[in-house]
Image (tube, grey):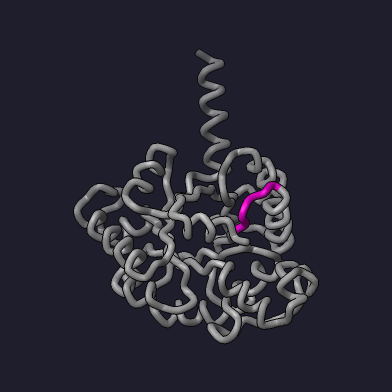
């Protein structure tokens, strides 16, 4: 079961963080944090495939839902994290409806898409409960529980957000407020009218289609604000930024 899906169905918000240190141990250390998921980033960091697979395993061991942010739209880039056991993909810089259709083809099994099949880790190499019931049960479980979440951080995605959110196989949207504000000509002006209107449009499209809404937040205070606005999930900071901040504050306190 994907805990994020279950919490969404119950109307309960979820929270996670980005993993950018390429360290399975750092991922496993997040287990006691109380977070729901870890988002393994391959856009702004460069982990190997082995590192991605190890981080997914570490997240499972720590009781966290493993998500992966991929860095391009092609069959192998989409397929491999899912075979390794990722319970969702975040896809940055989406521009067009056709890009999203292609993502659905790669990420979802028939009859929704055309994901390639091989007994792999996400199905217990053919021996988990659904796989033992037959391929139809396994396909249905994956299509239901494995999240496909494009990022809305471009003008193109925003202009087509209603059509994208209505698409079968798309489970929600991840708002990237930094890049979206830059694309809209108001860099980091998150409270500007332009950004407020854009984010309301995204939220409205999610609510109208009963899809999940994720957003990046720089702090717990910001995350609380976004949940109050109606977002279903907040991704708070990253392991690398937190490491830098904690040690900076520790050094400053020592020197004081």
**Image quarter in which the N terminus is found:** bottom right
Residue plotted at (58% across, 51% down)? 37
Q: Residue at x 59, y 50 (%)?
A: 20
Residue farthest along the left direction in this orientation: 193
**Horizontal and vertical percent for residue 107?**
57, 76
Foreground of the two, 140 or 165: 140
Which of the 4 image quarters holds residue 161? bottom left
Q: Where is residue 213 in the image (x, y as percent from the top left)?
A: 41, 59
- Read off the magenta span: 62-66
**The image quarter in which residue 159 lies:** bottom left
- Above-or-below relation of 58 to 106: above
Number of marks present in the image shown? 0
Asked if the magenta segment contains residue 79, the reply would be no
**Residue at x-position 55% and y-position 50%:** 18
User: How far from the left and from the top, in percent, is residue 97?
Assistant: 39, 79
- 217 left or right of 76 in image: left
In the depicted structure, whether residue 88 falls above or below residue 75: above
Residue situated in front as seen by the camera: 124 or 51: 124
Task: Kindly identify the residue that appears in the image at 29 percent across and 49 percent down.
Answer: 190
Tell me, yes or no, whether the highlighted magenta stretch contains residue 65: yes
Image location of residue 111, percent across then percent down:
56, 86
Q: Compared with residue 63, is residue 73 higher up or lower down, i.e. above or below?
A: below
Image vertical order of residue 143 relative to residue 149, above or below? below
Query: In the picture provided, is 113 more to the left or to the right than 96?
Result: right
């Amino acid at each position: 079961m994907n805990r994020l899906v279950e919490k969404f169905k119950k109307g309960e918000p979820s929270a996670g963080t980005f993993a950018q240190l390429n360290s399975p141990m750092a991922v496993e250390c997040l287990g006691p944090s109380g977070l729901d998921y870890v988002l393994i980033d391959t856009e702004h960091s460069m982990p190997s495939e082995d590192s991605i697979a190890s981080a997914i395993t570490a997240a499972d061991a720590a009781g966290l839902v493993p998500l992966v942010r991929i860095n391009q739209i092609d069959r192998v880039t989409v397929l491999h994290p899912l075979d390794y056991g990722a319970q969702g993909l975040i896809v940055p810089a989406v521009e067009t409806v056709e890009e999203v259709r292609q993502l659905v083809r790669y990420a979802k099994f028939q009859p929704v898409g055309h994901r390639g099949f091989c007994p792999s880790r996400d199905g217990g190499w053919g021996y988990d409960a659904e796989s033992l019931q037959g391929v139809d049960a396994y396909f249905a479980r994956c299509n239901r529980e494995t999240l496909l979440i494009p990022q809305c951080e471009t003008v193109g995605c925003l202009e087509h957000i209603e059509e994208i959110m209505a698409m079968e196989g798309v489970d929600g949207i991840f708002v990237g407020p930094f890049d979206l504000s830059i694309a809209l000509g108001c860099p980091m002006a998150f409270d500007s009218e332009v950004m407020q209107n854009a984010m309301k449009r995204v939220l409205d499209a999610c609510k109208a289609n009963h899809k999940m809404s994720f957003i990046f937040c720089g702090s717990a205070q910001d995350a609380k604000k976004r949940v109050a606005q109606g977002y279903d999930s907040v991704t708070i900071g990253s392991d690398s930024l937190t490491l830098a901040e904690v040690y900076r504050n520790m050094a400053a306190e020592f020197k004081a």
